[in-house]
Amino acid sequence: MTPAVRVPRPLVLAGSVIFLVAVGLILLMVVRPSAASSSDSAASVPAESSVDVGFARDMSVHHQQAVEMAFIVRDRTGDEDVRRLAYDIINTQANQRGMMLGWLEAWGRPKSPDRPRMEWMGHPAPAGTGGSLMPGMATDTQLDRLRGATGKDAEVLFLRLMTVHHRAGADMAQAAAGSAGTEEIRNLAAGMARAQESEIALMADMLKERGAGA
């Protein structure tokens, strides 16, 4: 029988130390990227006073009223062009509003501000009257008039109110497109500005067709 080879104890201990060191290095490689990733994620969340958070909040409110006005006119006219524009506004702005509210949720930011509207633009909006929260938004009286109108009267009033609404919205979007810190807000805002400017031109033509001006 071949005699068993005895490994000197110092070599056994040295091997154990090398093994433990290797395991430790592997654990560090696994843990460190995770911690760095978590830190980077926290650092990428826009601040409460940021353009990104302010824009997402304010434009969500702006969009909500645009969708409301589009629903109102949709049910008060049979004109296909106006109804098509209303459907476009409902679908586009409701979807964009959902995206912005989703980002606020993901960033852990409240959806309702405790600071003045449009403060992120450098000129806070004064407290509105008649239910108008921000520039361009319709008052409660104007909304009631739209609800009470039908046919051509409803079309003209809607186009006028939405033109003013879009102009203010485009100004907000252009400001965010140039100043926001996150790529998603910059891209969304730039797309909004282009779309609303295009719809302003379209509504000007529609008003002319109805013998009315903005």
Image (tube, helix red, strand yellow):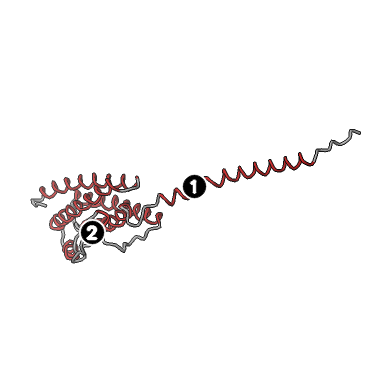
Q: Looking at the rendering, which quadrant does residue 27 occupy? A: top right
Is 33 placed left or right of 202 in the picture? right
**Amino acid under disc 2:** Pro
Percent position of residue 54, x then y: 30, 56
Mark 2: few, some, or many residues within 10 Å (few <14, many ≥20)? few
Q: Position of residue 157 (x, y in %)?
A: 14, 57
Within the image, what quadrant is residue 131 found in?
Answer: bottom left
Relative to residue 30, is residue 83 drawn left or right? left
Give the tally of numbered discs.
2
Q: Tag 1: Cα neighbours inside 10 Å, few (<14), some, or many (≥20)?
A: few
Which amino acid type is shown beneath numbered disc 1? Ala
From the viewer's side, name the closer residue of 145 and 59. Answer: 59
Residue lying at 42% horizontally and 50% vertically, measured from the top left: 43
Helix, strand or loop status at disc 1: helix
Quick one: SS at disc 2?
Answer: loop
Precedes in sequence: disc 1 or disc 2: 1
Please tell me which residue lies in front, 48 or 184. 48
Q: Is residue 115 left or right of residue 26?
A: left
The label number, if any, that marks residue 124 in the structure image: 2
Classify residue 21 as left or right of residue 6.
left
Q: Residue furthest left?
A: 211
Where does residue 124 sit, x and y in percent of width and height? 23, 59
Q: Which quadrant: the N terminus? A: top right
Residue 145 location, x and y as percent?
Answer: 16, 63
- Residue found at x 27% / y 53%: 90
Residue located farthest toward the front when viewing the structure as drawn = 10
**Residues tagged 1 and 2 counted as in contact (Cβ below 8 A):** no
Residue 109's label in the rendered image is none
Residue hosting label 1: 36
Which residue does the image show at 21% across and 60% down from the upper left?
125
- Above or below, 75 against 84 in this view is below
